[in-house]
Image (cartoon, rainbow, N blue to C red):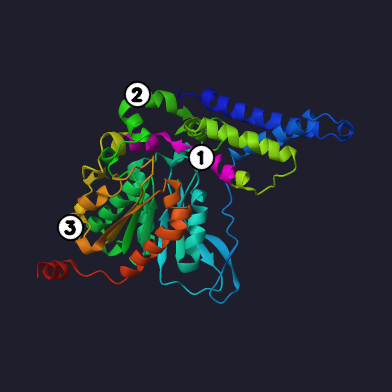
Amino acid sequence: MRYMYTYDLMETARNTNEWLGATARAMASYPAFALSMNPVLPLMAAWGEVTERAFSRMVVKPDWGIRSIVGPDGQDHLVDIVPEVEKPFGSLIKFSVRRRAPMARKVLLVAPMSGHYATLLRSTVASLLPDADVYVTDWHNARDIPVSAGKFDVEDYTLYLVDFMRALGPDTHVIAVCQPAPLTLAATAYLAAEDPAAQPRSLTLIGGPIDPDAAATDVTDFGRRITMGQLEQIAIQRVGFKHKGAGRLVYPGLLQLQSFMSMNADRHSKAFSEQIMRVSRGEASDHDAHNRFYDEYLAVMDMTAEFYLSTVERIFKNREIALNAFVVNGKRVDIGAITNVAVMTVEGANDDISAPGQCVAALKMLTGLPEEKKANHLEPGAGHYGIFAGKSWRLNIRPLVLGFIDAHSGAPVPAGKRVKLASV
């Protein structure tokens, strides 16, 4: 499948469905048809509206939509998105709050590169902004990156995180959500060995596959069953001439979306059927619950082939992070080298993507870190999304994370002095 025609065939199908939706909406809304009492026409217009919106959102990067926050003075403070570090495959952006002095907490939120844009963490960012200066890794869509920019695999991803942490300085508190958790742990260990002064104050790992074999899920089962050759044949395609990244090998976002939707096909089918009926009755709105969710869920991005394949092979199949055998730039990254950075893990009891046990495995690997700098939290009844953006995050996990950050905001104790105190 590593051909441009398969990539363009999916885009052709998407474009055609968007056009059919727009056509049906326009035709069924023709003023002369208002004289008819045929109930099919409102349904046809509603189907067209929902279909056009759904297929058009698949190729559009969502907006962050964070315009302002209310400050402690009761006034609204406008929020600007400012690039801090710009690189071909991803940028470090800051949510700059106007007329606000620098906050005591500086948080780097590491967003997943797993099919959706960093805007998936919109509610997480909004919840942290009143209490911290927030920076986010904003990964770019691989289809828009020229082949001349080179490759981007798990080692490059790790080095990007290293550069972002260096740019922010040692008073940073890092929060990694889901997919980037193992690579963020590796980036921190890399800094511990190569540039200790640039290490962050704390590291919070939320629902990430540090050790995929610690608890089985459909994701880990799939990784065991399929061979790398099979995966390359069924998942990798070449970007078409329509985009700047023409010729680049990618795991297409549209193909990823097909997998996402098929996992809960009945639920998605019901959601769209109900939305069509609401639109036909005039009960829907531009920003209702359905549109808020699917405008984000349907917006997908391509991943470079080398990043996707190396993630499956090195993180899931070979378990290089879990076995402390990960290599970056020819150097083995020793997780045990982390001795000053406080580390907290957060898991959801009902997480079916990164099941409980996968993330907390990081704490056992931190052999050089004192127990008082380790923490873990298992959130009862929480699924994967809930532990970083849902009710569980808002009510329980966010306060715990901020408390952990505050408890470890001081300058780290020198290694020699800390060991001496621990032995007393």
Looking at the picture, how far across and down is residue 48, in whole percent?
71, 33
* Position above or below: 66 against 352: below
Which circle's residue, 2 or 1, is located before the other in the chain?
Answer: 2
Asked whether, in this view, residue 69 is left or right of residue 303, the answer is right
Q: Distance between the residues labelled 3 and 1?
A: 38 Å
Q: In which quarter of the image is the C terminus?
A: bottom left
* Residue at disc 2, secondary structure: helix
Which residue is painted at 61% across and 40% down in the image?
57
The amino acid at mark 2 is: Gly
Specify the quadrant of the image occupied by residue 415. bottom left
Q: Name the residue under label 2.
A: 229
* Position above or below: 184 against 228: below
Out of 203 and 346, give the one closest to the viewer.
346
Q: Name the residue under label 1.
A: 301
Q: Report the span colored magenta.
A: 293-312
Q: Mark 3 points at which residue?
A: 368
